[in-house]
Image: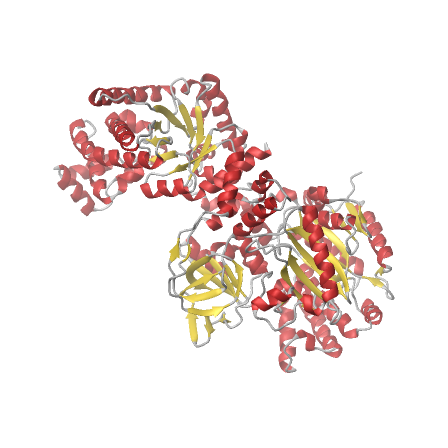
Amino acid sequence: MTKWVYSFGDGKAEGSASDRNLLGGKGANLAEMSNLGLPVPPGFTITTELCTAYYDNNRQYPSELSGEVDAALEHVGSLVGAKFGDTANPLLVSVRSGARASMPGMMDTVLNLGLNDETIGALAKLSGDERFALDSYRRFIQMYSDVVLGVDHYHFEEILETFKEDNELTLDTELTADNWKEIISHYKAAVERELGQPFPQDVRDQLWGAISAVFGSWRNDRADTYRRLHNIPESWGTAVNVQAMVFGNMGDTSATGVAFTRDPSTGAKEFYGEFLINAQGEDVVAGIRTPQNLTKQSRIEAGSNDPSMEEAMPEVFGQLVDIYKKLEGHYRDMQDIEFTVQQGKLWMLQTRNGKRTAKAALKIACDMVDEGLITSNEAVLRVEPGSLDQLLHPTLDPDAPRNVIATGLPASPGAASGAVVFTAEHAVECMQEGKRVILVRIETSPEDIHGMHAAEGILTTRGGMTSHAAVVARGMGRPCVSGAGTVRVDYAGKTFTVGGETVKEGDVITIDGSKGQVILGEVPTLQPELSGDFAKLMVWADEARRMKVRTNAETPADAETARKFGAEGIGLCRTEHMFFEAERIVAVREMILADEHDKASRKVALDKILPMQRKDFADLFEIMSGLPVTIRLLDPPLHEFLPQTDAEMDEVAAASGIDAAKLKQRAHELHEFNPMLGHRGCRLGISYPEIYEMQARAIFEASIAAAEKTGEPVTPEIMIPLVAMKQELDVLKARIVAVAGEVEKETGKKLNYLVGTMIELPRAALQAAQIAETAEFFSFGTNDLTQTTYGISRDDAAMFLKNYQDQGLIEQDPFVSLDPDGVGELVKIGVERGRATRSDIKLGICGEHGGDPESVRFCESVGLDYVSCSPYRVPIARLAAAQSALQV
């Protein structure tokens, strides 16, 4: 029989850290801390397998679960000397989620469960503090009603705020026991008004309601969005952790806090975090109260007058330091810990590998190698490749003038400029229109995640360094300034004010997440310097990886950027991108619009283009200095180059000496119903071989010129696109070889070159054995291979693929991350059949998937020789390739 429930506490547990997939991250770490003998409130974990069974069985539980939960609950009660539902000594519990991958704030939590109109009296008596007991009850009513019953939290916030205003009170801690009694009565009345029935008093009903709510939250909108953004499969499910309550709101000797064993923004080896006296954990992460610093040093640096935990609770702080050092040494990674102090007694509620910025991840990994905690290969595995994107883009120019209008906390480093928006929905709308925005909120909540992702950066007026906005922004790589308390947001008026300045929606601001500054207007930026820890980790990554990493580039600027980022050649030069420049588009159009049988006119236009192409290729060969350069001959359908206006048509007519009316007729003849599946790629070369002959000549002449200039041998790789049949490649390769012979004869130079093809059609993958008889290399063009495998246009897919993801039909957009089962299977077939014919065939990938870490892992698994990606993704691909090699 399947075991659904695992207990922990009192120095032992039924699970451990190795059971992460079964118990979820929180449950596994609670078990591990218990086994380490740390002070962990006892509890039990309902497994992730139960979550899967729950959804597979139409949200029904296995019959045996109830008995297992009852037994575990009784065991917890025996450890703490209390009983669930008892009116004299009630056991109170928290109910929390715990997926195997950390999803901070995305799923639901219920605290203080087990309180009702009867047990509240026992809690007041046992604690000797009626006010504390009533405060806990009002928190429970609000949280349970929101999470389980579906009564929106704003109903309760309005009641509380109105009461405080009417009684001229500011802080929750100023309310008396009688105040809370009155508020609780209003809370319960609101629940009955909204639901038509009273707040539930049966503690067992409360427990099962909370358990179901946590399992249900696995599929709420914000969790779905988070999983999609972080590539977390829905099939993993979440665990549910039920744990005896400990109270940080039991007076001035109690507290709650969140800490990191190293600074999650910079990676500095400093104990870092925040706490609140007389509060519960949700108060810290929700940003409702501004928290205090943990250490005296951080308090001084922050300019705060509120005592740090080190000063206010020195003995407990010392215990916390000992525990954090033990946890970091045990896990050999930076830890994110949650704790509660109940009347001077320290309790550990959570530890997990802490979320960190890319800069911090690099520093922590490199420092831990220097400290002997981990190896260089482990350091390579510790840094998420996608996170490097945070380091590969410009930062604010330190010498540029800044009109700083407000200062908050430097919650997530980096900088961004954009138009101010005040709602997540507006942020998404603007992003879809191509506009850059800064999302400004009083405080963010999990419901804002889609807008946070759409925004360039986030500004909040409340919350600390461990608030929702700070944690989520760091995970997304978005700059964030939190707790800018001087900023006053007016949602209704769509403005914010600070000092004498009023900023309207649509006005441009800049935020510096490294300094916590809010700046009026846009500030210039500087390119990043990739040295220090970044360079050190890249050296280790390059030592570990097998696959080469090239770039997709056709301009000198892109090629130079890619070389700076460590590219080992060009895997895709799209020659058509060179045709759109103003001084050459007329000649290109002249060539296209020449009569189908008028080879002479086409040759005149091509002769104009030849020296331009030759210089393009020579520049790239010189920059790559002997590294391989793969040049794809003209690929897109001709309609993309056609004149769109009468003025453009007249310009071509004047250049070519052909009547404009005749040119318009020719343009009409070139119209295709579905050009992406029509007259493009090698089909153009078959119809108009002089186009490919011109390009081949430009390549060969450029390779000779570049070799003479640099002294490095140049071996261009000429790629023929969209081949479906070996016969197409045979015809076009013969043309290229003939041009090479002509150039060798004219120059007296021996040419070295390869001729290959882009595998981007299912038929080509299936015919790879035959095609490899002619092709000397394959480059898998997975953008078009995905289009032709799925029968989906990449340009139109966004209209319905999100709906597919929302319904769980697909987990990943196949244009973002390579589909291993369909497209990947075709790649695998192409690799196997190509190598069976030509054992030394060079194999690579040049679609956008070449910079996606998950796709890079697939490429390693099928044995490709290299991946090619955009210049700014080269370091990401280098690191992903290293990790893939280490994980094989």
The residue drawn where x is 75% and y is 48% is 31
The residue drawn where x is 31% and y is 35% is 622
Q: Is residue 157 left or right of residue 669?
A: right
Q: Quadrant of the N terminus?
A: top right
Colour scheme shown: secondary structure
Q: Quadrant of the C terminus?
A: top right
The location of residue 854, given as percent across then percent down, is 53, 38
Q: How many marks?
A: 0
The location of residue 775, given as percent across then percent down, is 39, 21
Where residue 161 sits, quadrant-wise, is bottom right
Where residue 649 sits, quadrant-wise, is top left
Where residue 74 sits, quadrant-wise, is bottom right
Q: Nearer the viewer, residue 430 or 624?
A: 624
In the image, is residue 399 above or below residue 488?
A: above
Does residue 362 show up? Answer: yes
In the image, is residue 704 above or below residue 74?
A: above
The location of residue 306, given as percent across then percent down, is 63, 72
Q: Nearer the viewer, residue 36 or 349?
A: 36
Q: Nearer the viewer, residue 428 or 192?
A: 428
The residue drawn where x is 57% and y is 51% is 226
Q: Is residue 340 left or right of residue 632?
A: right
Does residue 819 show up? Answer: no
The residue drawn where x is 25% and y is 43% is 581
The location of residue 618, given as percent across then percent down, is 28, 34
